[in-house]
Amino acid sequence: MASDSWKMTWQPMIDAIGRDFDERPAVFVADRIERGAVRRWLEPLEFDCALHYDPEVARAYGYADVVVPTSALPTFALEPMWNPGDVLFAGAARDEQPLKSAVSGIRCEMEPPTTGYFATDIDIEYLLPVAVGDRLVKRGARLVACEPKETKVGRGAFITWQSELINERFEVVARTCTTIFRYNPHSQS
């Protein structure tokens, strides 16, 4: 169908399913996980579990220090989203997308051009505990799925990437699958 010809622009991505597009070496984020950052994570949740705030309790249960809540791990594995001198937004238009973002997923040369994106879901398999003092890195970008679709917001594709969160001992502490919808918005009439 001529009306579905735009879907064919995604075929190179579909053909690349299974390939890992992240060829960068594992570089750990600048900051070790600090007890105060974990405390700030717990506050709005009113998450009252002593393993997450009392080092003596954590050690009594065999952990090196306060245990980081599993829900916080992706935050502590993200690359810095901003550094002094960086410009995040090139313009002030409504729905302006940042020039770079640690949460936008990897871009590869096989994608057709798109101007918008948003995350639609994330699945995380937690494998090992993480404690205060650890540093994490997100490694890998294995393409798991690419599904072209036209939605109310525009035409694009749901792209699913698999990555690993790794500690400084190069142990995989979690595996993530994140789906991003990359699209071109419908024209406003």
Image (cartoon, grey):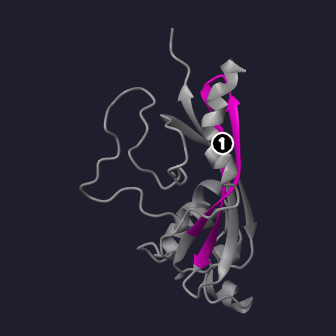
Question: Which quarter of the figure has residue 156?
Answer: top right
**Secondary structure that dominates the magenta span:** strand
**Residue drawn at x 73%, y 21% as measured from the top left:** 1
Q: Residues within 10 Å of mark 1 (few under 14, many from 20)?
A: some
Q: Is residue 156 left or right of residue 187?
A: right
Residue 164 is a magenta residue: yes
Q: Residue furthest front?
A: 2
Residue 110 is a magenta residue: no
Q: What x and y, as percent, mark residue 84?
A: 26, 58
Q: Which residue position is annotated with label 1?
A: 11
Q: What x and y, as percent, mark residue 120?
A: 67, 42
State which region is magenta.
139-166
Q: What x and y, as percent, mark residue 136?
A: 54, 75
Q: Residue furthest left?
A: 85
Q: Is residue 80 visible?
A: yes
Q: Nearer the viewer, residue 14 or 164?
A: 14
**SS label for mark 1:** helix
Q: Is residue 43 left or right of residue 176?
A: left
Q: Nearer the viewer, residue 186 or 20?
A: 20
* In this view, 173 is above or below 141: below
Question: Which quarter of the figure has residue 132?
Answer: bottom right
Question: How many labels sit on residues?
Answer: 1
Q: Nearer the viewer, residue 75 or 49?
A: 75
* In this view, 178 is above or below 127: above
Q: Is residue 78 left or right of residue 73?
A: left
* In this view, 41 is above or below 180: below
* In this view, 49 is above or below 179: below
* Type of amino acid under label 1: Gln
Q: Nearer the viewer, residue 54 or 175?
A: 175
